[in-house]
Amino acid sequence: MEHELSCLENRELSWLRFNERVLEEAEDERLPLCERLTFLSIFQSNLDEFFMVRIGSLHDQMLLDREARENKTNMTPGEQLDAALTRIRDLCQRRDRAYDALLERLKEQGISIVNFRSISAESEQYLGEMFRREFLPLLSTYIVGKKQSFPFLKNKYIYAVAVLGTKGDKQKIGIVPCGTNVFPRLIAIPERTGCFMLAEELILHYLPLMFPGYRVVSKTLARITRSADIDADAVYDEDLNYRDHMAEVVRLRQKLSPMRLELSREIDKDIVRRLCAQLRLSLDRVYEYDAPLDLSFVFGIEDTLRSHAELFYAPRHPQTSPDIDESKPIMDQIVQKDVLLHYPYQSIRPFLTMLTQAAHDPEVVSIRMTLYRLARDSKVVEALVEAADNGKQVDVLVELKARFDEENNIEWSRRLERAGCHVIYGIERLKVHSKLCLITRKTAEGVQYITQIGTGNYNEKTARLYTDLTYITARPEIGEEARQVFEALMLGETVDHMQTLLVAPHCLQDKLINMIDGEIARVRSGGTGHIRLKMNSLTDKTLIDKLIEASCAGVQIDMIVRGICCLIGGVKGLTENIRIISVVGRFLEHSRIYIFGDGEEARYYISSADWMTRNTLRRVEVATPILDADAKACLDRVFDMIWRDNVQARDQQPDGSYIRRYPAGQAALSSQNWLYDEAYRMAGKQ
């Protein structure tokens, strides 16, 4: 058992290694200043979600069974919490140092974030008058005492907290919410261009005005993070329709247990204990930071610097695929040849155009889609509404359990229903995460399918920020099986058997195992075995065990895993034939690619599924074979360029750590820059 554990990593600790790689981008002086600020904010928002989801989940596991052990490193929930919280403290100290360093760089650009210790008396007078005039009438105050109950503190809101001295011996706690959208977060300091104060610092300074009759003994800013780990199916109310039920889940999430208390200053420990007692939070969940409790204000700073192009990445725009002539009907072109689009290097526009053309094509009978995360102003929904208005049968599965996008999806589902679309909301106990679209046409030659299967959401915004692949084909064998998937979903069921597609939860994991076994068999028969995989996360223990078996058999396994990776490559006697890299860069590496074998017999797939148990066994996911020779060559080229990256890539080490590659003695190769340059060349722009 110990031998096997040496090549396995705990999921939570692996995720923290990933967020450390995000933090490294904020620390990297080679990057433009404003992009470093963005990565720092991403690091913090990632950590917020980690507390809400993963720490919340571990907390619930402890309540259910303290002695339960996870299946990678045999750690109990308590051991995982202790290890994660210790690691988080180290990372947050690094975050604070990175923030201080970035503030110094901002000063070189004429931008300063100040407090009252560094402004003039005249500026303080101006701010005081502004506070009394514009802030004080709109702020609420709470006092916690014998006759005053502790207020509900909202998730991720900032509060000013004061220790209030009274005539008696007992100190009281005063609380003022700062997280209102009424005030601008950045307050400009008069007569000092580019100088700002955070609104919460202004409120904190003038707390004595809000608690007349009390003496402010000490004060701090506070922010709590609540669990978001709520099982939508477990709290299902049969008296509500499912959409109303999900709206209730969103409301309930805001009131779940606190997982963390963040403070901007050290205050009396007795008061901290009282706060923790009210929040039912242990003292080891209290974090004191030097950096602001919410870094989202950096985007406001970036807006003031937009005229300084050198502080940002050079502009890049998605290019038109050379495989599609947008001046002609796109579906007719797909009938002639499969098309593989690669976002953000190539534009999502051909797919959107195809949907709009389908909405007006007299031969189109129906459009079916699965929707998981959509843009705020979704062109996809507009096309589906047009199709319904034109009398097409439009069947849409809107997954309302897309975490943190539930409200957005609820609103889109209402609009689709009002337009006459047939909308269903997923199936019981399973999330529908697949990215699948099926257009059915009735032509003179008979029924014709146009099928699109992708690795990413139908979201125009993220299609410019995430790397994703979308495969569009008229191959009847793919279209027929896509039809079967939709037929099952419309009945609230899942398919049990597929010949061409890989479809979770019943026929994805087992087929992946069979293909790994095929590479093992090649080696044992005297040939060579090779597996290339690209994904966001790897946690599925069954697949991990099979990869270890393949490595021991001599199969060469190359893996690009952006985030969580519970498998450690390069461990002698177990995973020495497995090499794992991670790429964190300008664009979020989101595409999933599975390639088994080399040469003519190689099998290529793209999918919406990471190799996580939740994807392979608890979601509806679809992987499609890539059958077009040009599309296969494209996947080879993409994988090869990312594998050779020596700017944004990190090599996993046998101890589970990652070492960043640097182009020492060789030409710098950023795979993302290279792929964009290639997209420009193919579009005839270079």
Image (spheres, grey):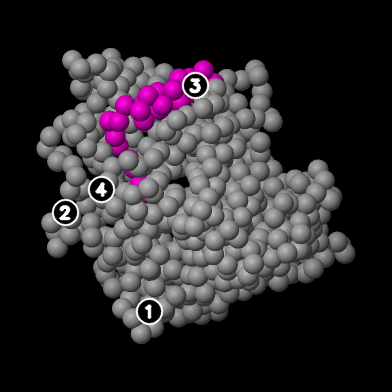
The residue wearing badge 3 is 488
Q: Residue at x 33, y 31 (%)?
A: 451
Q: Quadrant of residue 646?
A: bottom left
- Asked if 474 appears above or below 559 in the picture, the reply is above
Q: Residue at x 28, y 65 (%)?
A: 674
Q: CA distance from mark 4 to mark 3?
A: 32 Å
Crowding at dot 3, Cα within 10 Å, few <14 / some 14-19 / many 20+, comes out as: some
Q: Sequence order check: which comes first, mark 2 or mark 3? A: 3
Q: Position of residue 24 (x, y in %)?
A: 50, 72
Between residue 489 and residue 141, name the one nearer to us: 489
The residue wearing badge 1 is 663
Kind of residue indicated by mark 3: Ala
The residue wearing badge 2 is 683
Crowding at dot 1, Cα within 10 Å, few <14 / some 14-19 / many 20+, comes out as: few
Q: Sequence order check: which comes first, mark 4 or mark 1? A: 4
Kind of residue indicated by mark 4: Asp
Q: Look at the numbered discs 4 and 3 and tell me whether their residues touch, using CB distance below 8 Å.
A: no
The residue wearing badge 4 is 630
Q: Under tag 4, what secondary structure? A: helix
Kind of residue indicated by mark 2: Ala
Q: Under tag 3, what secondary structure? A: helix
- Asked if 285 appears above or below 391 in the picture, the reply is below
Residue 488 painted magenta: yes
Q: CA distance from mark 2 to mark 4?
A: 16 Å
Q: Residue at x 51, y 65 (%)?
A: 579
Extreme-front residue of the structure:
526
Between residue 164 and residue 125, name the one nearer to us: 164
Mark 2 or 4, closer to the camera: 4
Q: CA distance from mark 1 to mark 3?
A: 51 Å
Q: Is residue 276 left or right of residue 463?
A: right
Magenta-colored span:
468-492
- Asked if 513 appears above or below 128 in the picture, the reply is above
